[in-house]
Image (spheres, coloured by chain):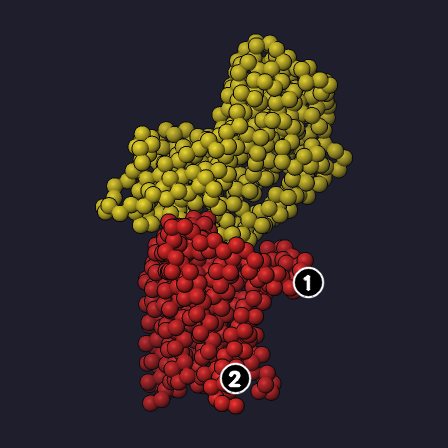
Amino acid sequence: MPDLEARKVIEVGYAGNERLVMNMGPQHPSAHGVFRAILTLEGETIVAVDAVIGYLHRCHEKLGETLTYVQYPSIASKTDYVAAMTSELAYVLAAEKIGQIEVPKRAQYLRVIAAELQRIASHCLWLGTWCMDMGGALGGGATVFLYCFRERETLLDLFEALTGARLLYGFHQVGGTRYDLPAGWAERCRSTVDLIERRIDEYEAMLEGNPFFLARTRGVGVISRELAQEVGVSGPLIRGSGVAYDIRRAEPYSSYEAFDFKVPVETEGDCWARYRVRMVEFRESIGIVRQALEGLPPGPISSRPGVKSVGQVRIGKGETYARVEGPRGEVGCYLVADGSAKPYRMKWRGASFSNLSVLPHIVPGHKVADVVAIMGSVDPVFGEVDR
Amino acid sequence: MAPAVRDLIAAFVLLNGVIGAVTYVTLLERKFTARMQSRIGPYRVGPHGLLQPIADALKLMMKEDVVPAMSDRWVYNLAPLAFLLPCVLVFGTIPFAPGLGLADLNIGLLFFLAVSALEIVGLFMGGWGSNNKYALLSAMRAVNQIISYDLPFIFAALIPVVLSGTLRLGGIVEAQQGGWYVAYPVIGQLGFLAYLIAMLAAENRVPFDILEAESELVAGFRVEYSGMKFALIQLAEYAHVIATSYLGALLFLGGWLGPGPSWLGAIWFTLKALAVFLLVTWVRWSFVRIRVDQILAISWKLLLPVTLTLLLAAAFVVTYQGGGGVG
């Protein structure tokens, strides 16, 4: 296979010569989206893996140059459609940074609430699909999956009440947020996160005491601290490898410095460590949502008037890189503005893309079944990988 | 009526009974699972979804039968039958109540174990004949797994044989008049547990369903099958599950023994078998699948020594206490 050679696939040593090349994807039950992994197998053991991406490329960055600052936030949510709030936030933060636009305190808190609820919803989806990868759609995995979706549903209901949409929100706008909390929403949100907190205990009871779950995750897909830093993974992956790096803490945006939360770190770097990090993040996010609802300041939700025309926001010349901590890691937006209503150039840094690039380093040497466990623990969203 | 004709009719009734029961057991599993997963389950076809299995069967019959162009046609086409035959054949030896059964052979258990082990042939034929890499890997895993788990399965099933001193399934039930073997101190409980684990593995159900492993191997050995052939494979799999559930109820839970008049025997037996089935289903829908090397490790390092020790312990007890054995 010539293109396999050209790409310098990382290989582990093997003794025999009976190899089987097997495609996992682009259409495959375990692919979280469309991803193709060309596995070279020797028996059950993987000798090499070659990852092929790009099946979901939609010219997002070019699209960013043709849409105005008013239009694009709703499109930005389509890069990572599982955590739509995050990429919207990165985009508007970049625009605000260039234009030096003030964001009212209330809007900042609303953004935090949205981002953290989004993190919980995204982690719900991750846990469900990951367990389904390991446990099968006809097994215990499907049970966890349906439980997680039950909880995610309550969060989507909250988003629907807030923005009118359930998947792609268009909640953020340059200068603030587009919507304020509807009447009674805060109460509903509190009871929802209370419920989810109890349910997380149930998930942990179901999974952590389960020897099969431990056998599938402990010591599987170990990312060493050095490898994590070298490849540039972020989010739960790097925190699972012993690096306490969280942009909310390292470079606070949107008033994150005002909240009290832990940055969970595990040192093993395996699937289990990443699982633990995310489970703690569930609880920390719930804590942040509670604090934000508690201390929600009164005032306007945006420093700019509401949307009247698509070209109403003009940003002065300049370029910047804004980044936020998404559920999957660092989501960055590089923006060059030329003074018009549209950016001159934009570029996404997707967390999933960088995280996924660790796969060829860690997969060889594992068994076929471990590929899906590792893939799931990386939690890629291919809208964000391919953009 | 000539005995041959009578046997033929009995076989016909049993075969159709098994197929009907198996179809409805799928509904039971779906309803049970739905409750576990806070869903409702099939509800639209008939009252409470009672006609769902029939709708499913009709749908599968009407599906196009696709044969992959590069497949090994004979092997591919024969595989579902080779898989179904042993799974249904084992019902022939199960006595559902005293005198109610096709043939209560004096080597009934041996027949059951030998025939049910034959399913691997059909499985491997399917995996090989499909000419598909997923199916091939699955067939490879199947051979690995079934060979490793047949031994503990057989050893666990032999414990009641040692305790009762007979291979005849009816005889094993009669020997449990004094107390079900699951109540036999230590040996009975551990034996039943080992039987359940080995049964899960022999039936390829989660957590041991690496053959099917749809998140890795799509659907394993049956990935290329469609329509009626797929239905036959599905049928065979469920028939095997039900057969081993009946066997478990017979070996450890006292078969048809139960309070009430003797004609209730078959009902007691079926209820016990369904209890075993639901226990296995419960495990299936709460665990994650384990890896192929871990499956083999569990079998060879844990299950095989345990069942072998239990078997020897049972033999020891029988020899020195004189319980049951034919002497």
Location of residue A318 with respect to A141 vertically, above or below: above
Q: Earlier in the sequence, mark 2 or mark 1?
A: 1
* Image position of A348 (left or right of B32): left
Foreground residue among B54 and A13: B54
Q: Amino acid at mark 1?
A: Gly
Which chain does red denote in the image?
A: B
Which chain does yellow denote in the image?
A: A
As drawn, the label of residue B125 is none
One can see residue B202 in this view: no
Circle 1 residues within 10 Å: few <14, some 14–19, many ≥20: few
Q: Secondary structure at mark 1?
A: loop
Give me the residue at 32% from left, 45% from top.
A20
Residue A339 percent location from the top left of the image: 60, 9
How much space separates mark 2 and mark 1, taking CA atoms?
A: 32 Å
Circle 2 residues within 10 Å: few <14, some 14–19, many ≥20: few
Q: Which residue is mark 2?
A: B100
Chain letter of the residue beneath label 2 in the structure image: B
Q: Secondary structure at mark 2?
A: loop
Foreground residue among A300 and A43: A43
Q: Dividing the picture into quarters, in which one does residue B309 lie?
A: bottom left
Give me the residue at 33% from left, 80% from top.
B315
Q: Amino acid at mark 2?
A: Leu
Give me the residue at 53% from left, 34% from top.
A327
Residue B33 percent location from the top left of the image: 58, 59
Q: Dividing the picture into quarters, in which one does residue A121 lie?
A: top right
Q: Which residue is mark 1?
A: B46
